[in-house]
Amino acid sequence: MKKLVILVLFLSFSLNSYAQKTPTYVIKRATLASESISSKMSFNETQKKDLYTILLDKYDSNRKSIKGKGLSQEERQKIYKASFNETKKYLSEKFSMKDVNMINKLHREWQKNNKK
């Protein structure tokens, strides 16, 4: 019985160490982008939170799909295009199409002004 408890504890700790947390630079990027867009569009707190969550998911998904895989620029562009379409879909569930188009426009401007 004692060995079983030790085994269960060991497995739970080892599985927990494999759980990946979102890197701080991804969180920072999503925060800055969503704050910039939200301030220009005068969003309420719920809208700000929704936008932040969607952008955080987008950036983290892109990071997981691209980082460390040695992809060509063409392959990266396909991932970015699919990510844009998916993000647009999620935005349209929370915002009007007019707002979605404005969010995308402001997001592109933000990206141009905040390149690495």
Image (cartoon, rainbow, N blue to C red):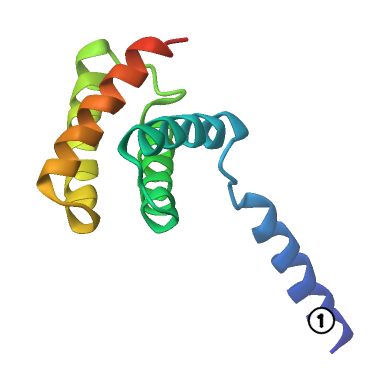
* Observer-nearest of 26 and 93: 93
Residue at the spot x=35%, y=42% of the render?
42
Residue at the spot x=69%, y=52% of the render?
17
Q: Residue furthest front?
A: 42
* Observer-nearest of 49 and 78: 49
Vertical placement of residue 13 versus 86, above or below: below
Vertical placement of residue 4 versus 68, above or below: below
Local crowd at mark 1 within 10 Å, few (<14), some, or many (≥20)? few
- Would you say 109 lies left or right of 105 here? right
* Observer-nearest of 100 and 80: 100
Q: Position of residue 48 (x, y in %)?
A: 41, 48
Residue at the spot x=59%, y=36% of the render?
23
Q: Residue furthest left?
A: 97
Vertical placement of residue 53 versus 111, above or below: below
Quadrant assignment for the N terminus: bottom right
In the rendered structure, which amino acid carries the disc numbered 1? Val
Occupied quadrant, residue 115: top left
Occupied quadrant, residue 3: bottom right
- Would you say 28 lies left or right of 38 here? right
Q: Residue furthest bottom?
A: 1
Q: Position of residue 70 (x, y in %)?
A: 38, 16
| Residue on which the image places disc 1 | 5
Q: Position of residue 18 (x, y in %)?
A: 62, 51
Q: Position of residue 58 (x, y in %)?
A: 35, 39
- Would you say 4 lies left or right of 86 here? right
Q: Secondary structure at mark 1?
A: helix
Residue at the spot x=27%, y=21% of the render?
108
Q: How many marks?
A: 1
